[in-house]
Amino acid sequence: MQSTASPSIFTTQFWLLGLSSFLFSSSFNMLIPELPGYLSQMGGGDYKGAIIGLFTLTAGLSRPFSGRLTDRIGRVPVMAFGSLVCFVCGLLYPVFTTVMPFLLLRLVHGFSTGFKPTGTAAYVADIVPANRRGEAMGIHGMCMGVGSAFGPAVGSMISQAFSLNGLFYTSSVFALLSIAILMNMKETLVEKQPLSREAFKLSWRDIFEPDVFSPALITFLCYFSFGAVATITPDFSEHLGLQNKGYYFMVFTISSILVRIFAGKISDQHGRMPVTIVGAAILIASMIITGYADTAFLFLAGGAVFGISMGILSPVLSAWTVDLSGDHNRGRSIATMYICLEAGIGIGAFLSAALFANKPSNLPLVFFSMAGFAAAGLIYTVFIYQQKKRQSRVI
């Protein structure tokens, strides 16, 4: 028991990684509330779903490569590449001022989250004991969550006080600071291989690791809601008269932060599936509340409940994925989960934009539909949990 005391988690490396993730998360999240309006000004209001959809498409397509590279050349280079993409894209947004080049840049920007979180999750799993994995994922997720709350709220303030170009350059600076921290971190992959053409040759298992099918499928179904939130809530905020379009993001992320540590720790003690069931049920409630929202208060209350659900599901599903992986395929397994996460977010973004069709009267339909996908995830989790309990009684 002595070897699993708190100092084995709260190391300098762990906190450096957390700071880098905070800066990375702030970098790309600070843009989200302002991009729908920015695209509309260009004349691309009908493409709002593509803002998140294209971003997650590239992230998902790049996951097999990031997972394979994480297991071959190391965690740190993969993380650094993800932050580098954020840095470069921040500098290019002021240059790409028409619809199609802007959408192309969103496609490229997606490489950032295709690489950075994959290497990060593998790094966390490398440096913490298995029996405290959920807790560690929760604490690190808190760092990401603070960035997700800080970024949108501050991003809207920067754009209002200065300009959108000022916002883009600030995003780039945050990404650069994230890279600087990573360059001073120790690599945790023991048997590294040099970068070569072989590293980019994918097999089917690099695309989908069957060992982590269950958490990956649940992630896919539950993250439709995230795609809808990222795409539709800026318009929802405007519809309800909220000047700062980042308030919903800030509220849901703050509530997420408050439960992440406890959710991960409870899942270490009582199992991943029971905690996942609770998180999925709360997610359904959050989508229903948001769909019914006709005041700013109820809208933000829905955001708070949504944050609680994400604060439960994110660290628990990540820890569950790592539980089912081995040291040799950790990056590949995490990449599989993230492919499903990005697919859920991307499809949710496109579907919600299509259902919304720029008509406020369609807002309830959008969020009730997202509740339906979360309900499918809940039903599947309950089913496999009941199966597991029956099998344990037989044994």
Image: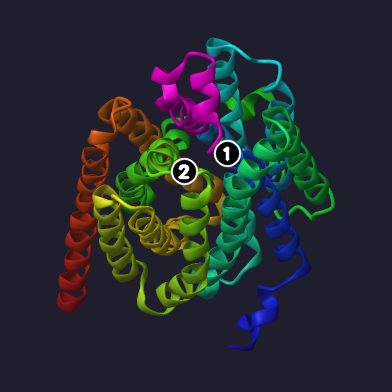
Magenta stretch containing residue 129, yes or no?
no
The residue positioned 62% from the left and 35% from the top of the image is 112
Q: Residues within 10 Å of mark 2 (few under 14, many from 20)?
A: many
Task: Tell me the colour scheme of the image.
Answer: rainbow
- Amino acid type at circle 2 is Tyr
- Secondary structure under badge 2? helix
Q: From the image, which quarter does the N terminus lie in?
A: bottom right
Q: Which residues are magenta?
A: 33-61
Q: Quadrant of residue 92?
A: top right
* Most foreground residue, 393 or 127: 127
Question: Label 2, on which residue?
Answer: 338
The residue positioned 58% from the left and 46% from the top of the image is 152
Q: Earlier in the sequence, mark 1 or mark 2?
A: 1
| Residue 136 seen in render | yes
* Most foreground residue, 275 or 354: 354
- Secondary structure under badge 1? helix
The residue positioned 26% from the left and 48% from the top of the image is 291
- Left or right: residue 57 versus residue 392 is right
Question: Label 1, on which residue?
Answer: 113
* Most foreground residue, 147 or 331: 147
* Most foreground residue, 309 or 230: 230
In the rendered image, residue 349, in percent from the top left (x then y), is placed at 38, 33
Q: Looking at the image, is 324 positioned above or below residue 166?
A: below
